[in-house]
Amino acid sequence: MSKFSKEELEDFTKSYHELIFSQKTIILATVSASCSPDISYAPFVRDQAGYFYIYISELASHTVNLLNNPQASIMCIRPESESPNLFARERAVFDCRVREITHDDEIYTARLNALQEKFGEVVSLLRSLPDFHLFELRPESGRYIVGFSRAFMIDVNDGGLSQI
């Protein structure tokens, strides 16, 4: 495997950021109390620190999973229709520490307002339902895969990439 030049690494970094910013939902992997894996998805917003925020119902198994086991793996992936090789789809995967943001937390209203700005009035309706919870998913590590032999570690603090 050859090393990428500084310019190539900068191009991959731009592509990684474009992938994340082009997404409206994340694929969400959680674990149940009985250690069974569960996969789902959720609409999200992201803040300046790179944390992801989701607003999800207690009726969904992933909400209960996150309340009982505050960790998750999330993925943003290039759509199949935009991928030249389905065996090597472009994707970013993060292992996250999760915390519930309660109504009295100072960022609660701001994050719900950001969700409403991004997704419209449906969030206004969801805000009125008592079973919805706001979660912060804080990436602890990340990987960006562009294709075969093109895998990078994501610096979760500054969004930079380093070749694996």
Image: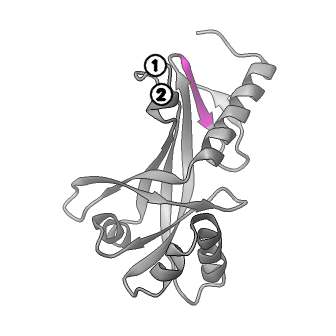
Marks 2 and 1, Cα distance to the nearest angstrom? Answer: 6 Å
Overall secondary structure of the magenta section: strand
Q: Identify residue for label 1.
A: 85
Is 158 positioned to the left or the right of 37 in the image?
A: right
Q: Position of residue 141 (x, y in %)?
A: 55, 46
- Left or right: residue 34 versus residue 63 is left
Judged left or right of residue 12, residue 93 is left
Residue 34 sits above or below residue 90 on the image: below
**Looking at numbered disc 1 in the image, what kind of residue is underneath it?**
Asn
User: Residue at the spot x=46%, y=50% of the render?
Assistant: 74
Q: Quadrant of residue 108?
A: bottom right
**Residue lying at the far right of the rendered structure:** 7
For the point 44% across and 59% down, the residue is: 42
Please indicate whether residue 2 sits to the left or right of residue 80 in the image.
right
In the image, residue 88 above or below residue 29: above
Give the magenta-colored segment's residue range. Answer: 149-153
The reply to whether discs 2 and 1 touch (Cβ–Cβ < 8 Å) is yes
Where 144 falls versus 94 (above or below)?
A: above
Q: Residues within 10 Å of mark 2 (few under 14, many from 20)?
A: some
Residue 89, disc: 2
Amino acid type of disc 2?
A: Arg
